[in-house]
Structures are given as structure tokens and as C-alpha cells.
Amino acid sequence: MSDLPHVPIRFTTQKAFASRLILATLTGRPIRISQIRPSSPTNPGLAPHEISLLRLLEAVTNGSTITISYTGTVLEYRPGLITGSAPGSGASGGVIQHEVAAGCARGVSYFLIPLCLLAPFSKSPMNVKFTGPGVVTSATPTGDISADSVRTAILPLYSKFGISNSIELRILRRSNLGPRGKGGAGEVQLVFGHQVRLPKTLHLLNTGRIKRIRGVAYCTGVPVSNNARMIEAARGILNPMTADTYVFSDLSSAPYLPNKEKANASGKAKTGIGFGLSLVAESSTGCLYSADVVSPPAGGVPPEDLGQQCAHQLLETVAAGGTVSLVAAPTMLTLMAMSSEDVGRLQVGKDIISTEEIIGLGRDMKAFGLRGWGFREAATGQENDIVVSIVGRGDGNVGRKIS
């Protein structure tokens, strides 16, 4: 039994790739993932964004070992100690520079959400700056939320676990996917300076009523009138629901990248052109529900349609019930499993808990030795919700015990 923590936990396919790596790092259990796109005729094995995530984990940990097969279809990961931006761990001036290469098909939130889960258990504060031609700050067609939604709908939830100090997400330069999906060159910096021994036990069972709606309309390299048109269309739907609705407008110039065309190889071309809208609804009990839309890379969608689509998406998220939305549920459930050794309770909509992503997360947690989940019906009048009970692991931050 003493050799059990050193035996890799075996998984297949690239599903829940980031989630499994984060669970492995938090629990200290090695994993082996096989059959990663083995049947792809052009791009078998790990994708560029997955390799970039592995490089990020290597930068914020000490002693991690990553072994990739020759074809890239098999990965073995042995996690080390989460050190954050500690001196001597690759940080320059207390900041880790992580460059995302061109061709990354995922938004920067694909890296931010897992990094935020590791940051509270780090030995030192986490300060990571994302740069490079592959950084996309907007939402993406692959399902990634925008950096604005991470800042307004994900990070505030950490305060419910007693993690609220010195946390900041700075969007230094915006970027969309742009025409034909060729975008990037954004710049984002995550500062996470609140490390804890154990997160507090969570009891969140009251959804409350929506009291305010906030949002950000952003455009990059296009006229600012697109923002006004999106805001007006969204407010036309949301104002009858709540009068306290305010959407901020942000205009950014398009970043430039070296031109790869032979006719003008020495010049630079605009990239990351587009516009989008992020909305967040807050209830009287502090529950957050978010929605994200962005102009498609092919174009052809007027701003009014995007504004209405985002407003309807927000209303659907609220109507799904529960105290947490689908995009934030994995973060909340993971922190509950890593909290103090007590029973935490979270009320979740049945349509959310029954999704493939959440069911897979529960199975993966059990594979890593975490406690199982308990379920019971919610209070009378909330038939569409269910209460999830999770007993915390109680191991906490190993780095803080060492220091």
C-alpha cells in the first residue's frame, strides 16, 4: 500500500485534460494518459494548447516530471510542489512570463481557470503574465469564456472559501480570434497573492434574487459604435428584469504581428480584430451567473444580434437554477473537495449536475482518492435543484507547511 501514491492513475483520451492535470497536481498523484487523438490522420497526439498548459504547470511547480511518447499520444505526468512565482523557480522579477505560441485554438481562460485553482495552494504568491501571438482574451467558439468573465464571475467566488486578498486579473491588451480564426497577441497578467492552509467549508444553499447586472462590451480594431449597439440591444431585454443594469464599453486598438505574406514580409499586419460582450448577474446572496458571446471569425453577425443573444444566454443561465453556473461549477466543486475535513453543501441545478463535464469530474475525483458526493433534493419550491454534499480532503497546502 505504501507504493500506491507512486503508481500512475491511468486515463484514456484527451477529455478533461486540464482538469485531470490539476487534480493530479493538487493531490500529488501521478497520472498516465493514453490514446490522445490516436486516429487523427494529420494531428495525432497532444494539441498545441495542451503542450502549452504542460509548460505552464512545469513553470509554477518544482520537481514535476513530464514524459511524452514519440507520437505524442501517451503522456505521463508526475507532479511536484506548487511553488508559484518563488525566486529561483523560473520567475523573473517575481513574474513568470508564459508565452502562448501561434496556432493555439483556445482562449486564455483555458489557462487562467486551472491556474487559479492551483494558486491558493502555492508556496509563494502566483504572478503569471501571458504573452505571445496565441493569447486570445475574448470568448472562443470552442467554449472558452472571456478573460472578463473570469475576472467578474470566477475570481469573486474564491471569497466564499476565505480567499479574497491580493487577487487581480489585468487585461493589458485585448485580442479576438479575428478573421479566419487568425488572432491572438493579447496580454493578460494574473496576480494571486492569497495562499491558505485550507479553504473554508462552503455552505451555499440560497439562490436569492437577481439584484444587479454588470457587463463589458469590448471591441478590438473595429469602430466603437459596435459596443453601443450591443449594449442597447442587451439592455432592451434585461432592463425589464432589473433596473440596476450597467455595461461598460471598452475600445482597444488591434495588436500587430509580423506579416507572413511574401509580398510584404518586412511589414506588420493587424490581428485579433472583433467584438464581444460579457454579462454577469449577481443575486442578493452573492451568487454569480455569466454569459459570453463574441463575433464569429467568419463575420456576418450584426452587433444587435450578439447583444440579444448574450442577454438571452444570461437569462437561460439564471433559469437553469442552483447557486452556481455551469462554467463556475467545476471550480466550486474542486475547492470544496480540497477544503477542511468537514461536509460542505452546494445547491446546483439538475441540468448542470447532469452534464457530462460534471459527472466526469466526480468520477475523476474518486479516481484520485477524494471523497464521493452525496445528493439530496433541494427545499420545497426548488424542484429543479439538488444539494451536493462533499467532505473535504483536509490535507491542505503542503507548501505552506514546509515553509
Image: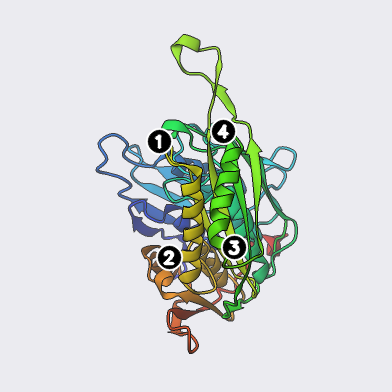
**Disc 2 from disc 4: Cα separation:** 40 Å
Residue 29 location, x and y as percent? 48, 61
Marked residue nearer the N-terminal end (3 or 2): 3
**Is the C-beta separation of discs 1 and 3 under 8 Å?**
no
Q: Which mark is residue 222?
A: 4
Query: Which quadrant of the rendered structure holds the N terminus?
Result: bottom left
Marked residue nearer the N-terminal end (4 or 1): 4
Residue under pointer 3 = 239
Q: Toward the viewer: 36 or 131?
A: 131
Element on which disc 1 rests: loop
Above or below, 380 against 140 in this view is below
Residue 2 location, x and y as percent? 47, 68
Element on which disc 2 rests: helix
**Is the C-beta separation of discs 3 and 2 under 8 Å?**
no
Marked residue nearer the N-terminal end (1 or 2): 1
**Disc 4 from disc 1: Cα separation:** 15 Å
User: How busy is the neighbourhood of tag 3: few (under 14 within 10 Å), some, or many (20 plus)?
Assistant: few
Q: Residue furthest bottom?
A: 380
Could you say which quadrant of the image residue 150 lies in? bottom right
Residue at image location 34% in from the left, 41% down from the top: 45
Q: Which mark is residue 361?
A: 2
User: How busy is the neighbourhood of tag 1: few (under 14 within 10 Å), some, or many (20 plus)?
Assistant: few
Element on which disc 3 rests: loop
Residue under pointer 1 = 298
Of the residues shown, which amino acid type is indicated by label 2? Leu
Residue 305 location, x and y as percent? 46, 48
Above or below, 16 against 206 in this view is above
